[in-house]
Amino acid sequence: MKLVEHFKHGLDAPICLTWELTYACNLACSHCLSSSGRRDPRELTTAQCQSVIDELQRMQVFYVNIGGGEPTVRQDFWDLLHYAVDHQVGVKFSTNGVRITRERAEQIAATDYVDVQISIDGATAEVNDAVRGPGSFATAYRAMENLATAGVEGFKISVVMTRDNVGQMDEFKAIADRFGAQLRLTRLRPSGRGADVWHELHPTAEQQRSIYDWLVDHGEGVLTGDSFFHLNALGSSPIPGLNLCGAGRVVCLIDPVGDVYACPFAIHDEFLAGNVRDPGGFESVWRTSELFAELRQPQTGGACTSCSAYDACQGGCMAAKFFTGLPLDGPDPECVRGNAVPVAPGIDRPMPDKDHSRKSRSRRTVSLGMPGPKIPMTVPDRACNTDPIAGLR
Ligand code: SF4
Ligand code: SF4
């Protein structure tokens, strides 16, 4: 049996486990897949996080993708990172860079099995800050400088492709090359707050062709998180990757309150498999949940099976279909053969179950506790927006 067939039936442990440590975030990106902003008071405690790590070690999960929210605003973040590494669970964490000071960068450089991914969504402040908020490009850029200066080689620069930044792919690559970093391009999904801006921001059909062509021509060494396999229907050169929807098979999400979902882009009751606090913990959820068993069954391609590109495209992304209100066994909303049912803005579609967006935000010029000029940024209305244990001390 080919390796990919094993993956379709699910593995004993996920190979792409995302763990969002907190919903708290200093930014309010318009496309945030987890609608982050405010901390949830039910978030896992330090001890609960440690016991999840113990389980991951027992399950031989070799690394975990830590995200949020902004994970570094958890006061126990660095302790948890070291706890994971000491327990043979490598850490790749995503950050907007707010806490990546020179000292932290040096600490990262000195720690094995830790990888860091800085998020930007524009190669210029103008394009980036329109999505991620004022000052966010400067913050991310300074973090990259700190990492490069500290000698962290091959850190990742992660970009969500939007209508406004497709034309900047060469510039993103140049930034990555400048810092000795690796570029990671991923697909915008209509998940979380992304659903609200998807119609304005998702790439046009012509831009999807540009992304495909660029990845085929220049994509060697560029990571994609296996997120563009629906574009494989455009040509005979497949974009490297597993090229299948791994939800519940090789992919899953643990959210900040311990809920386990089939995929980070599918935060909705329909895709909720259990909670790490349930008896049997994460291992039992991964191995015995009915939802995951169902997702590991052979899937029907529905309306896609008659398409000559089905083997290459697999009908696209389950989460993208779900949150645009399309049938899960039909074409992706961005089907490159034009076979998707048109999705009009404002039609009935499933809404994300969880929304931790801040309701009102004030913008002031503040110091981020790092050397350099003060920059404008979103200031939290309440302490719990950035401090996961605010009010619990
Ligand atoms: S739902 Fe979409 S993002 Fe999630 S694993 Fe499947 S294809 Fe990937
Ligand atoms: S019809 Fe389905 S399989 Fe064919 S290109 Fe569109 S999404 Fe892919």
Image (cartoon, rainbow, N blue to C red):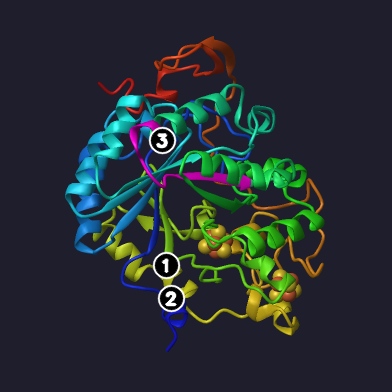
Residue 322 vs 124, above or below: the answer is below
Q: Secondary structure at mark 3?
A: helix
Q: Which residues are magenta?
A: 148-160
Q: Is residue 181 left or right of residue 208?
A: left
| Disc 1 from disc 2: Cα separation | 6 Å
For the residues bearing labels 1 and 2, Cβ distance under 8 angstroms: yes
| Residue occupying image coordinates x 71% and y 72% | 233
| Residue occupying image coordinates x 64% and y 80% | 311
Alpha-carbon neighbours of circle 1 within 10 Å: few (<14), some, or many (≥20)? Answer: many
Q: Is residue 19 left or right of residue 269?
A: left
Q: Quadrant of the N terminus?
A: bottom left
Count how many numbered circles sit on residues in the image.
3
Between 168 and 37, the one lying in front of the other is 168
Residue beneath disc 1: 250
Q: Is residue 389 left or right of residue 299?
A: left
Residue beneath disc 3: 148
Residue 237: x and y in percent read: 65, 73
- The amino acid sitting under disc 2 is Phe
| Residue occupying image coordinates x 68% and y 58% | 214
| Residue occupying image coordinates x 19% and y 62% | 58
Alpha-carbon neighbours of circle 2 within 10 Å: few (<14), some, or many (≥20)? Answer: some
Q: Is residue 97 visible?
A: no
